[in-house]
Each structure stands twice: as C-alpha cells, then as structure tokens.
C-alpha cells in the first residue's frame, strides 16, 4: 500500500486493521464500470453542447 494513502486513512480515524483491508481497494470491475459511466457522460455532454450550439446558431444567425 502507498504510505500516503495509509497515513491518510489513519488521519481520517480508520483503525489500523481496516487501513490494510483489501475491501477498501477498487477492483478491476469497479474501474471498468466507472469507465463506462464516464464514456456515457462524455457523450451526453457532447450531444448537449452540439444541440445547444445548433439552437444558438438558429436564433442568432
């Protein structure tokens, strides 16, 4: 474990046993799920930006 992370856990009041516990770590499946959610959010923001720009273009030009 990275010493800075361990020290942050201890400073936050986590017991030493739980600071070394593997259940606090993200699994590969967790990271893949987050990547999929971020990809969806990127598409949503891009679509929203394009749609907003199209409306503004139609209004002002």
Image: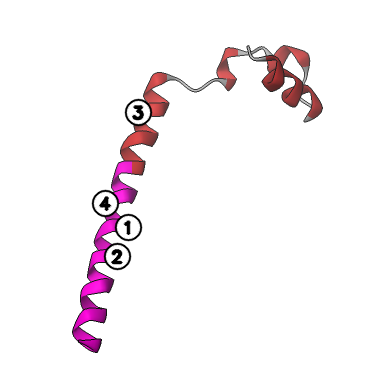
Q: Label 4 near label 2: C-beta < 8 Å?
A: no
Q: Please state, as top left, top right, bottom left or bottom right, where the N terminus lies in the image.
A: top right
Q: Earlier in the sequence, mark 3 or mark 1?
A: 3
The local crowd at label 2, few if under 14, some if 14 to 19, many if 20 or more residues have their Cα within 10 Å, is few
Residue ID for mark 4: 43
Q: Nearer the viewer, residue 44 or 24?
A: 44
Q: Label 2 near label 3: C-beta < 8 Å?
A: no
Residue ID for mark 2: 49
Q: Label 2 near label 1: C-beta < 8 Å?
A: yes
Nearer the viewer's eye, disc 2 or disc 4? 2
Rounded to the nearest angstrom, the CA distance separating label 1 from label 4 is: 5 Å
Q: Name which quarter of the figure residue 48 lies in.
A: bottom left
Residue lying at 37% horizontally and 23% vertically, measured from the top left: 29
Q: Nearer the viewer, residue 40 or 54?
A: 54
What element does badge 4 sit on? helix
Q: Specify the label residue 32 is tagged with.
A: 3
47 in magenta: yes
Q: Which residues are magenta?
A: 39-61
Residue ID for mark 1: 45
Q: Label 3 near label 4: C-beta < 8 Å?
A: no
């Amino acid at each position: 474990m990275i010493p800075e992370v361990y020290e942050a856990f201890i400073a936050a009041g986590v017991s030493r046993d739980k600071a070394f516990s593997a259940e606090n770590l993200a699994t590969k499946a967790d990271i893949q799920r987050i990547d999929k959610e971020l990809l969806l959010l990127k598409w949503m923001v891009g679509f929203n930006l394009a749609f907003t720009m199209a409306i503004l273009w139609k209004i002002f030009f």
